[in-house]
Image (cartoon, grey):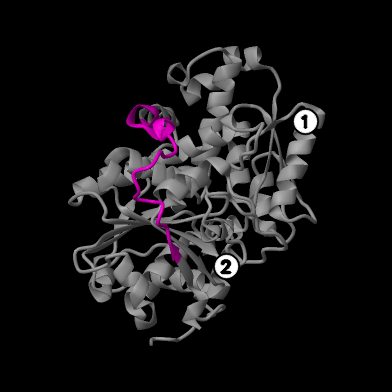
């Protein structure tokens, strides 16, 4: 059953040809992002948790988990992208540079009167939409959020709790994006989406920049613990997060950048299938995409993120749901004195994949390819906490989606 974990090495990643520009994720741009996020009263760097006992058991030097369940009290990282994109959009409306506008300044009566009434809209499985809705609420604006069929009622209620309008549609994620975009055009709303298309590039770029706060915090925290990572495992939906993390580390370290692995659910693996095609052009996945990794159930790659991943990412992985469930159980039931991490389905998949690769002899080929050994220091991102508490308990308490049990 472990053959359900599919992978492909990217021969394009380390060549010397012309590559996608990383200027928008440079040190100077990231500083602007960090300064903006640090202006939030709620700002605090999320913890980087060292799982030293797990690392010892798995035969590597270190496993470090960036725990985004603490982000702004919203239990997920997505708010970083939505808030920065909204900040950049409003700065443009005001003919100001984002560097001159703190979040608190954007909330002032003077600025609010200059901006007038704005409605922000988005499609989401829950986390991104909640972040957009929260930002709109903080700024005294309106939000309308659409969710794909099968979305969690708990996540919908969390969105509505911000004062936003929220709806679960009968559409898949990508069609829900089209619904939001259509309504934005019809009603004069502003769509805040991490999916890019030909006429819609600025806001997805700003969202990716917003995510850089997470990477910058992690690198600073790792430096205090002994230095940069040798490997980064990051999950992909449309590829905006993965592209942002890849771009940040490639910009910071150039040819000495960490080996990067992108992980997706096998029912929504548009990035993996794009890599598999081998020609550098993105490929779409259609259908219900009914994976437990709701935050990654996206079928159409973000073109900006895809270009970065095609040019810089080392390995792409497509995996079944049990891998995410295994990651949740590993993080929720730590070894020895390792800290506990409450991680949701989309947040834990990178840990599940990593441990399978390290411990399953049937995956030794990819382990060797990635040069995972006793000196490896691996960074993973737990991008969400238990954003659907009932599902979390079904998996971690009751053993739903059991591991395959194959050890070679």
Residue 85 in the image, given as x and y percentages of width and height: 55, 31
From what the image shows, is residue 361 above or below residue 106?
below
Residue 172 in the image, given as x and y percentages of width and height: 73, 56
Q: Is residue 16 shown in magenta?
A: yes
N-term-proximal mark, 2 vs 1: 1
| Inter-mark Cα distance, 2 to 1 | 33 Å
Q: Residue 140 versus residue 307: which sits nearer the camera?
A: 307
Q: Residue 275 versus residue 65: which sits nearer the camera?
A: 275
As helix, strand or loop, the secondary structure at mark 1 comes to helix
Q: Is residue 230 shown in magenta?
A: no
Classed neighbour count for the residue bearing mark 2: other residues with Cα under 10 Å, few (<14), some (14–19), many (≥20): many
From what the image shows, is residue 223 above or below residue 293?
above
Magenta stretch, residue numbers: 8-30
**Dividing the image into 4 quarters, which one contains the C terminus?**
bottom left
The residue beneath circle 1 is 185
For residue 137, what is the image quadrant? top right
Q: Give the foreground label among 2 and 1.
A: 2
The residue beneath circle 2 is 266
């Amino acid at each position: 059953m472990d053959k359900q974990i599919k992978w492909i090495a990217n021969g394009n990643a380390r060549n010397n040809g012309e590559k996608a520009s990383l200027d928008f994720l440079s040190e100077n741009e990231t500083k602007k992002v960090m300064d903006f996020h640090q202006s939030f009263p709620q700002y605090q760097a999320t913890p980087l948790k060292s799982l030293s006992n797990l690392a010892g058991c798995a035969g590597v030097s270190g496993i470090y988990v960036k725990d985004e369940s603490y982000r702004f009290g919203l239990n997920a990282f997505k708010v970083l992208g939505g808030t920065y994109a909204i900040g950049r959009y409003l700065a443009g409306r005001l003919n100001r540079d984002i560097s001159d506008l703190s979040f608190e300044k954007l909330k002032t009566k003077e600025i609010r009167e200059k901006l007038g009434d704005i409605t922000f809209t988005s499609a989401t499985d829950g986390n991104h939409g909640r972040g957009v809705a929260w930002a709109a609420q903080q700024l005294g604006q309106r939000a309308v959020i659409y969710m794909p069929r099968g979305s969690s009622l708990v996540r919908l209620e969390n969105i509505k709790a911000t004062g936003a309008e929220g709806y679960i549609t009968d559409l898949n994620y990508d069609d829900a994006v089209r619904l939001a975009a259509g309504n934005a055009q019809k009603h004069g709303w502003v769509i805040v989406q991490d999916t890019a298309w030909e006429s819609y590039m600025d806001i997805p770029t700003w969202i990716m920049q917003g995510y850089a706060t997470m990477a910058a915090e992690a690198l600073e925290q790792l430096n205090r613990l002994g230095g940069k990572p040798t490997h980064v495992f990051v999950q992909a939906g449309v590829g905006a997060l993965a592209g942002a993390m890849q771009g940040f580390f490639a910009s910071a370290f150039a040819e000495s950048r960490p080996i990067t692995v992108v992980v997706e659910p096998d029912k929504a693996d548009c990035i993996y299938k794009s890599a598999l095609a081998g020609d550098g052009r993105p490929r779409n996945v259609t259908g219900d995409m009914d994976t437990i990794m709701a935050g990654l159930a996206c079928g159409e790659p973000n073109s900006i993120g895809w270009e970065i991943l095609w040019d810089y990412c080392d390995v792409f992985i497509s995996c079944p749901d049990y891998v995410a469930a295994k990651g949740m159980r590993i993080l929720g039931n730590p070894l020895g004195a390792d800290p506990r991490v409450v991680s949701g389905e989309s947040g834990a998949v990178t840990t599940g994949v990593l441990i399978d690769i390290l411990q399953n002899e049937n995956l030794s080929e990819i382990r060797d390819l990635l040069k995972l050994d006793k000196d490896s220091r691996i960074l993973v991102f737990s991008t969400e906490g238990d954003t659907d508490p009932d599902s979390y308990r079904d998996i971690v308490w009751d053993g739903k989606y059991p591991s395959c049990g194959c050890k070679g």
